[in-house]
Amino acid sequence: MLMNIAVRNVFRNRRRTALNVLMIAASFCSIVIFHGFSHSLVGSLEEVAINTQFGHYQVATQGYWDRDPDLRWEQKMLDTSRPEIQALADHPEVDYVSGRIFFFGLLNTRRTSLSARAQAFDPAVERRLMDNLEIVEGESFTGENPFELIVGLGLQKHISGNPGDLITLVAQTVDGAVNAIDLEFKGVFATGISEVDDSTFMLPLQAAQLLLDTDDVETLVVLLNRADVVSSVTADLKASLKSFPEATLRQWRELADLHQQVVSYYKVQNTLIEGILIVLVFLAIMNTVSMSVFERIGEIGTARAIGDRRSDILIQFVIEGFILGCLAVVIAVPIAALVATGLTSLQIPIPLPGSSLPYLVEIALLPSSFVYAGLISVFTATMGTLGPAFRASRLNIVEALRRNQ
Amino acid sequence: MVEKGRLVLEANRVSKKYQLGQMSVTALDEVSVQVHQGEFVALAGSSGSGKTTLLNLFGCLDLPSSGEVKVDGVSSLVDDDNFLSGLRATKLGFVFQNFNLFQVLTARENVEYPLLKQKVSKAERIERALMALEKVGLKGFADRRPNQLSGGQRQRVAIARALVHRPVIIIADEPTASLDKKVAVEILTLMRELNEREGATIVFSSHDPTALEFARRTVQMSDGRVVSDSAQGTSSF
Ligand SMILES: Nc1ncnc2c1ncn2[C@@H]1O[C@H](COP(=O)(O)OP(=O)(O)OP(=O)(O)O)[C@@H](O)[C@H]1O
Ligand SMILES: [Mg+2]
């Protein structure tokens, strides 16, 4: 009967109840949608980071990871002819394993000479990187000829060259000798990350190895078929490298500082939004229950006179808040699902840094965030009643009764 | 005179003072009254004489500034709000001037309310509530909301609510003041019947002289004191 009375009291002032329910429902939807949005966005950012930069894993020598200044460059390089590397590539979950070298070189055109950062990789193997690389001028690596070069958008402005030009790249070999090769300037890329675009050019690994006079690589990126097996495959991959102690495997998350910052940024943002919504709901409920207590002082006096304890009064109002919260959640669940699906279906494109492919806004329908938002809504609505409910329970009975006139 | 039953309500030299700023108002001044089981007592007196104040003390809704009130032998001078709630819930029934029914509840649910405080099954609760409604002449009105009942009917529901849990005593402050004369007489007749047939002990207040004729004993108050206490041997019945 207690529940029954509470439900009827909730529906006593329909307009006020409707307003409250709407308010709680709106905050529920906001939480679900923000969670769903950031989840999808972070997921896509992860994918871009994996595809274009980190792979799922990277293998390099310990000296390379430590940037050990006492080691010569050559000593930090990895020998790719080792059978362990082949074993790595043969793992059923591994899509491909490919080498990379980073170094500084001098780009010489007819008019300028400029030092820039070179990223050497194998365009024939690293499909995912190639797919995500936006070429804004000229074309990408053709694959027919290893002596090709593409240049970051910002960097191009400084070298005053155009696609089709021949560029001479001068660099130190791994032994410290000076060497040079001629490369054809094929095109201009843009990652959307200005630090990269302003300072980086790319060339096929084969050409770089020739220039640097080495058969080795600095790092090996390992791409899996599916991202969700990362945690279960790690041990396997480490095991296959056991007999090759110089090679150390690192998971991409250990390498992706920036990405982790982005993720924690979204976490902070979500927490902030949740915090604001919780405060709003809390205040709204508190206000409503205060009004409701005020209107029902006479009734509270009567209930106390005929034997209700203070706690009975308190519980009565708290239950009403709980019901409001539950009601709002029940209504908000389908609304949130609908709005999320609707927003996703609009396919709103936004650019993602690091990828040529625009990101289509997606609101993931996460059961966990529904549960979370539901709990928060009900909890906040319930807690919002506590203050006024407590005051109601402490009213002086005789004075409260006088309100029945 | 009828033989006296057990002592169920007593005020022993009870005073109640209110502090209004610098001024102290004495609403009750060393009042002593005893009520025995089966009595039907009227508190009479002009406005401000202290009737409501005394009934509030009897009902354990308020505590005296000095003196002691005992309900069924139990003193209300305890510093335990839950204990007093329990005392009201079990030993006392209340009827108010403005009926004070819960608007969201039906007549039957209003009457059931005091039984929620006791270990009574739902079936028994409903049965006892319906029985109480029948006693006050409201058979067939169980499912009406208060706003679907007349003033007299509402007060009948309130009386049913006040007796459903078989309290030791029913306290009614101005139970007829909000009713017109004819209905007031009906309510007083009902109260008198309940006193005679069911043995309900009732203390009520009124400043309506006709209401006092229904009581079997009248305690006259003035300025916070009892000025006379007389039994009506032969009533207007
Ligand atoms: N809360 C209060 N604060 C100050 N004075 C009070 C308070 N309650 C009652 N009084 C005073 O106590 C005295 C007795 O009041 P009480 O309400 O008991 O009278 P009453 O006999 O019930 O009057 P009425 O017939 O008008 O209901 C009055 O002088 C009143 O002003
Ligand atoms: Mg009064």
Image (cartoon, coloured by chain):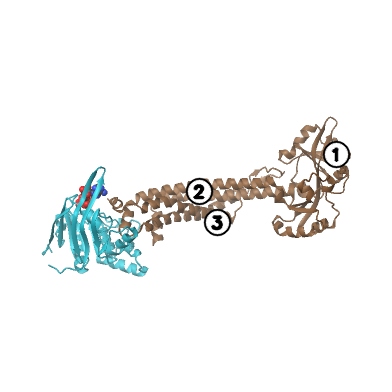
Chain colours: A brown, B cyan
The image quarter in which residue A102 lies: top right
Label for residue A278? 2
Q: At which x and y percent is residue B159?
A: 26, 61
Q: Secondary structure at mark 1?
A: strand
The 10 Å Cα crowd at callout 3, few under 14, some 14 to 19, many 20 or more, is: some
Tag nearer the camera, 3 or 2: 2
Chain bearing tag 1 is: A
Residue, far front: A70
Label for residue A371? 3
Q: Quadrant of the N terminus of chain A?
A: bottom left
Label for residue A171? 1
Q: At which x and y percent is residue A76?
A: 82, 48
Residue at 45% across / 47% down in the picture?
Answer: A284
The 10 Å Cα crowd at callout 2, few under 14, some 14 to 19, many 20 or more, is: many
The image quarter in which residue A175 lies: top right
Chain bearing tag 3 is: A
* Distance (Cα) linking label 2 and label 1: 59 Å
Do the residues indicated by labels 2 and 1 lie within the same chain of the protein?
Answer: yes
Residue A399 is at least partly visible in this image = yes
Residue, far left: B234
- Looking at marks 2 and 1 on the same chain, the residue that comes earlier in the sequence is marked by 1
Do the residues indicated by labels 3 and 2 lie within the same chain of the protein?
Answer: yes
Tag nearer the camera, 3 or 1: 1
Q: At which x and y percent is residue A119?
A: 79, 43
Tag nearer the camera, 2 or 1: 1
Q: Secondary structure at mark 2?
A: helix
* Distance (Cα) linking label 3 and label 1: 58 Å
Residue B50 is left or right of residue A301, and the answer is left
Give whichever of A42, B16 is nearer the camera: B16
Give whichever of B115, B191 is nearer the camera: B115
